[in-house]
Amino acid sequence: MSSSPEPVTPLAPSLAVIIPTLDEAAVLPRLLRALLEEAQPADRPDELIVVDGGSRDGTPQLAARAGARVLEARRGRGAQLAAGGRAASCELLLFLHADCLPAPGALTALRRAFGDPGLVASGMRQEVRAPGLFYRLVERAADGRVRRLGVVYGDSGLAVRREHYLAVGGYSELPLFEDVDLSRRLRRRGRVALVEDAQLSVSPRRWRAEGALKRTLLNWLLTAGYILGVSPRRLARFYPARVAATGEAGGVGIETEREGGAA
């Protein structure tokens, strides 16, 4: 006996994926393939937007050839995310890092979860692509942060209803903690939850490049400073990866669209 696939509300709500990039030619193609070649229609985004911050490795060109809409913005994740959020028109906005991979069925699970009208925003269940107890603890901490605090970091895949995203002003163009800042404002609008059956595979490259313990301790110290009211622009001086990525602490996004589609 043949079985029919589980019904999904006909591609509703519509979903846009927004990816900030800076020299991500080595990892972005894998994510684009996962999003665009997924067999189930509800697991493909209705909009795919790549917001580049001045790559020199051909990232914008390969994204355009894959069929993404490519924008250019002032370098800095906060500015790039804000530019993508302004450009998207779907009911749901899903912000992903270039080195993350949604598991098969993840976007379908997000669409289904937002069938609950009380859900304002969500995170995805994190899985770090590396063995070892340290990474299992990282996963538990990330998932627990979403469940208990309603705070969704970038590597947990923030999904948000566009109406609420716009109502709170979207991403602030901060050099650091733009995700925490947005999560706080979204929590005032309603429930932020973890979608357990939407899994997101996360690269361990940043922990490995900076040293797992060093990076974790630095993140804790910077987070404590932010909670105590220290300016993100001041804290960014102590986070070399963000200083290098922005070129300066902060800045206003400048959007320029490139033609998408096959070259």
Image: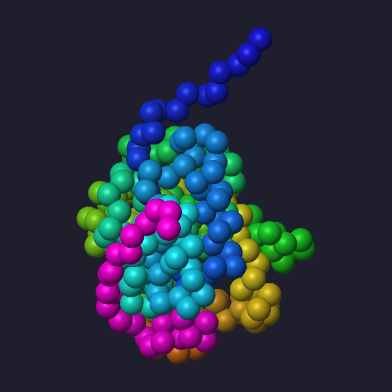
253 shown above or below 235: above
Residue 18 is left or right of residue 251, and the answer is right
Rendered location of residue 231, percent (x, y):
36, 83
Rendered location of residue 138, percent (x, y):
64, 63
Residue drawn at the location 42% of the way across and 45% of the way down: 45
111 or 71: nearer the viewer: 71
Residue drawn at the location 68% of the way across and 59% of the way down: 129
Residue drawn at the location 37% of the way across and 62% of the way down: 70
Residue 222 is left or right of residue 228, and the answer is right
255 shown above or below 3: below
The N terminus sits in image quarter: top right
Residue drawn at the location 40% of the way across and 70% of the way down: 52
Quarter where residue 168 is shown:
bottom left
The C terminus sits in image quarter: bottom left
Rendered location of residue 69, percent (x, y):
36, 57
Query: In terms of secondary structure, what is the magenta stretch mainly?
Result: loop
Segment tinted magenta in the rendering: 239-263
Residue 257 lies in the magenta-colored region: yes
86 or 193: nearer the viewer: 86
**Residue 61 seen in the figure:** yes
Farthest front residue?
263
Quarter where residue 26 is shown:
bottom right
